[in-house]
Amino acid sequence: MPQTAAIEVKNLRFRWRKALPEVLRIETLEVARGERIFIRGASGSGKSTLLALLAGVNLPTGGEVNILGEAINRLSSARRDHYRSDHIGFIFQLFNLIPYLSVLDNVTLPCRFSRSRKERATASATSLQDEAMRLLAHLDMADEDLIDRPVTELSVGQQQRVATARALIGAPEIIIADEPTSALDSDMRQAFLRLLFQECEETGSTLLFVSHDRQLESLFERHIALDEINRLGRGEA
């Protein structure tokens, strides 16, 4: 029996309110399991909106979004939250870290909501904290002076790396990254991408990486211009 796609979108439509025009109209988008996909688009083109729809954070006004064979838009709000916790690691553009938690507690947070991610995180590590430290070390964030700090005391670049380690912990099947390198310098950007690709390759995770930075495009197996798949981006009514 053939394996289902990681992501499959059919006749997707989205508008923020009934009185407003549609912002996305995508006939089809399919991403195979284990693929590394680069999606580019200018600011305001709907990149973050598309990611929110794929993660079940927002619901389409038409069409269907299948994640790992599950029609996520048909699930209740609570079931979408649970499904996302188990299967999707999300690197948000604005990080969405919990300000009163330490670096270490922010990284391990997904495993408090998902038993399956906790089990995967501890399968090859002595403890959940050890796995978090392994990921942080790859991102040059394992200094003992850093890991117990509240994340509000970190630089923007450091916060971005914490958000990345949080998304990767527990080997979710899909990693969604929204402009994840925007606050990193050139050297750290390379280290970040090496870690991201290495972790995805080792776990078989699918990577959906959205950015306006075309210098990164050649590093990916496949790249998609959002305005080419979004019919509204081509001026079609």
Image (cartoon, rainbow, N blue to C red):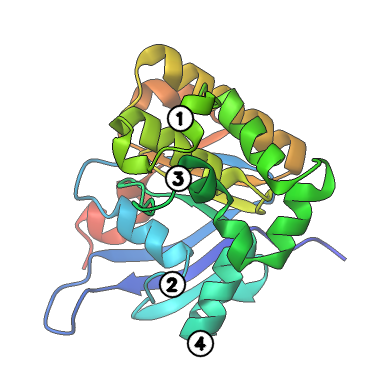
* Dot 4: element: loop
- Identify residue for label 4: 76
Expressed as whole percent of the image width and height from the top left, the position of residue 157 reads: 34, 29
Q: Amino acid at mark 3?
A: Ser
- Give the crowd class for mark 2: few <14, some 14-19, many >=20 residues within 10 Å: some
- Identify residue for label 2: 11
Closer to the eye: label 4 or 2: 4
Q: As rendered, which of 198 and 46 lies closer to the eye?
A: 198
Q: Amino acid at mark 2?
A: Asn
Label 1 vs 3, first from the N-terminus: 3
**In this picture, is 79 found above or below 163?**
below
Closer to the eye: label 2 or 3: 3
Label 3 vs 4, first from the N-terminus: 4
Expressed as whole percent of the image width and height from the top left, the position of residue 155 reads: 30, 29
- Identify residue for label 1: 146
Residue 221 shows in this picture: yes
Tell me the residue at 59%/67% (across/down).
113
* Dot 2: element: strand
Q: CA distance from mark 1 to mark 2?
A: 46 Å
